[in-house]
Structures are given as C-alpha cells and as structure tokens.
Image (spheres, grey):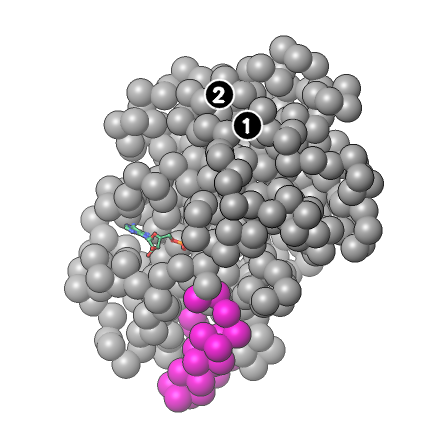
Amino acid sequence: MTTLTVNISETPSGSYPIYIDNDDLKELKKKLDEETKERKRLVIFSEKVYKIYGKILDFKKSETFVLKDGEQQKNIKNYEKIIRKCIELKLSRKDMIIAIGGGVVGDMAGFVAATYMRGIKFLQVPTTLLAMVDSSVGGKTAIDMPHGKNFVGAFYQPKAVYINLNFLKTLDEKQYKSGFGEVIKYGFIEKSCQYGEYFNLIKILKENRDKYEKRDNEFLARIIEICLKLKSSVVEKDEKESGLRKILNLGHTFGHALEEETKYKRYTHGYAVVLGLMFIFNYALKNNLCGREYYDEAYTLMSVYGYEPPCFCGINKKRTLNYMKTDKKSDGNTINLIVPVNYGEVTEKTADSVEFDIEYIK
Ligand SMILES: NC(=O)c1ccc[n+]([C@@H]2O[C@H](COP(=O)([O-])OP(=O)(O)OC[C@H]3O[C@@H](n4cnc5c(N)ncnc54)[C@H](O)[C@@H]3O)[C@@H](O)[C@H]2O)c1
C-alpha cells in the first residue's frame, strides 16, 4: 500500500491522503465504512460499476444513487436529482458523499458535495484508469452545459482518495486506453510540473509497452503514483489555475473541442486528449517552438500505444475552431494554448485563431 499526501494550504482541511493498493474489495468497503462511521452518506456510482461491484461493496439501496453512463449524464438535471436525494436523506454538513466510478461520477459527485449546504465532505473512489491518474485528485468538480464541457463547477478537494487496482481488471480496452491518454500527457509535462524528483516518464512508457498490454499491477501502481505526484505538485502550487495549473491542460483545448463537435460519441476523453496532443505538437513544430527530434519521439510514443491520427470525416472545422475559442481558458477571440517546447517541458501561448487549421494533424 502506498500513501501520498496532497498539501493544499488554502483548503480548510489543509491536506488529504491518496491511498493506492490492491486489497480485496471487502477491505475497501470496511475502510469506507470506517471513514463514514456515525455519519449518513450518499454513495454515487457509475452505472456499469454498480452492475459489476454493487453486490460486493454492498451499500444500502436507500443510500445509493446510480448515475447512468456517458458524458451526457454530467448534466444539470442529474445534478438536481442528486441534490434532491441528499435532501431526502437529510444529509447535513457532518455527513458524507462517496463517488465510486469514473471521472464523470467523480466530477458530478464532487460538484454536488461542493454546493450542497455550501459544501459537505466527499471521498473519491476512482475505478477507471483515467480517474485514478488524474480526475479524482486536484479538486476540479463540474457539470457540462450546452455551452460547453465543465461549464459550471467549483474547485473543491475530496477528504480522501481510495485507489484500488482491482477495479482495473474489468475496465474495457477502450476505457483503459483512454486512461493512458492522460498518462502520456504527464510524460510531456513532467519537467514543468516542478516535482522534486525526476522519473523520466516518457522513457518508462517507451520501455514498458508489454507491461501496459498485460495490465501489470506493479507497473500500473508505479505509473499512477508518478502521475499523481506530478499532479499534486502542480495543484499544491496553484490550486485554482491562475498560473502553473494550466499546464495540465496540454492537449485539452483541441481535445475538448473535438469531443463537443462529435457530441461525446466518437472519442473517449483520453483519446480526444491524445488527438489534442498530436494537434499541439504539429502546431509547435510549424511555429518552431519544438524541434523535429522531440516531435518525432512524441509521435512514436503515441503510435506505440496505438493512437493514430483520426479521419476527420464529418468534422466541421469552423465549428471546432469556435469551440476552442469558447473554451473557459480563452477570451472569445484568441485561444490560450499549452505548447510543448522541450522534452517534458511546456509553455503557455496565446494564438490568433487565423493561425489555426485542423490539417495540423498529419
Ligand atoms: N476533474 C478533473 O480534474 C478531470 C480530469 C480529467 C477528466 N475529467 C473528466 O472525467 C470524465 C471522463 O472520465 P472517465 O474516462 O473515467 O469516463 P467515465 O466516468 O465516463 O467512465 C467510463 C466508463 O467506464 C465504466 N467503468 C468505470 N469503472 C469501471 C470498471 N472498473 N470496470 C468496468 N467499467 C468501468 C463507467 O461505468 C463508464 O461506462 C470526463 O467528464 C472528463 O471531463 C475530469
């Protein structure tokens, strides 16, 4: 078992633990019971996770809310339903919300916890690789609006994060690969994260493709730990994204725009992020911001992990560009980008929309 700590001085609780293990899930249940002892609780599950693990985890039906699967479910109607469930259960500020599932449930449950009675405590139990390496830590909580993804939200940190590797055994190939999209992103931002130790994540990824294939527990535990150390380092320095935290958005401006343009149906979040990485590496090369050697290395890594530049059939370039301009990080006319410059290093650039073309993807 590994325990990491996220130290955020601005939050009332100051810091919180991340537990990483592969204990029996009955053990996990005991720990969650212990954390919520003498409190009421609402447990919010991803639909598929509830189907597979509902019985083993054995929470009372009355304290459970199952959120249907899909990004489209991260909406205001479901937010209201969950708030009503909190009211029905008479949850008070002493009580607790538990999110068990992927990033969709984590973001939704976190936003409910941030806003119900101006904030009640919540625990993250991430069950997808993407949620384990990224979304369960750092306190970004949100729901989507027709105007854009994560349009309404709050920075609100969990009380603790419980990562259990056993969940990964039932994750389908598409979702597993999606999680690796965010892992690769961490490789490209590693040095900019300003963590005290250097792991050379790009090299680790290059050399361990077979362990990825086998879902080797030791390898996955190491990767999760590295990504979370890098993420915590960034979030601790800039919780509310006024500066450094923007680097975590590498690949996301184009990735989010693609997700919106394709109505969240064509690509998983992590896959869209990798397409965003391809886009931004092309932008960097064309604008002499990164060298050919690093560019080739980055493309090789992405293709070794099976990511290929997509067919853009049916994608409206103008609309996609507009989605990039309406991204929360942009001012409506220009586009703020995080751009790779050197091995594991990125910088922030503001781009004029006319510089852009989807053909940047090779
Ligand atoms: N808050 C943040 O910092 C942050 C960071 C990155 C992404 N996100 C958000 O995360 C969301 C994407 O999360 P995701 O990729 O986890 O997708 P997801 O939550 O939609 O889960 C994907 C699918 O996997 C299923 N699933 C989950 N765990 C499983 C398991 N152990 N076995 C079998 N099936 C399982 C789910 O039921 C769902 O069908 C997006 O909304 C994205 O915006 C948030």
Q: Which residues are magenta?
A: 73-97
From what the image shows, is residue 111 above or below residue 313? below
> Does residue 119 show up magenta in the picture?
no
From what the image shows, is residue 242 above or below residue 250? below
Farthest front residue in view: 314
Q: Which residue is mark 1?
A: 187
Q: Position of residue 102 (x, y in %)?
A: 39, 54
Amino acid, disc 1: Gly
The residue depicted at 80 percent of the width and 54 percent of the height is 331
Out of 101 and 75, give the one closest to the viewer.
Answer: 75
Element carrying mark 2: helix
On screen, residue 256 versus residue 349, left or right, reads: left
Element carrying mark 1: helix
Q: Position of residue 162 (x, y in %)?
A: 38, 52
Q: How many marks?
A: 2
Decide if residue 256 is in sight here: no
Q: Which residue is mark 2?
A: 301
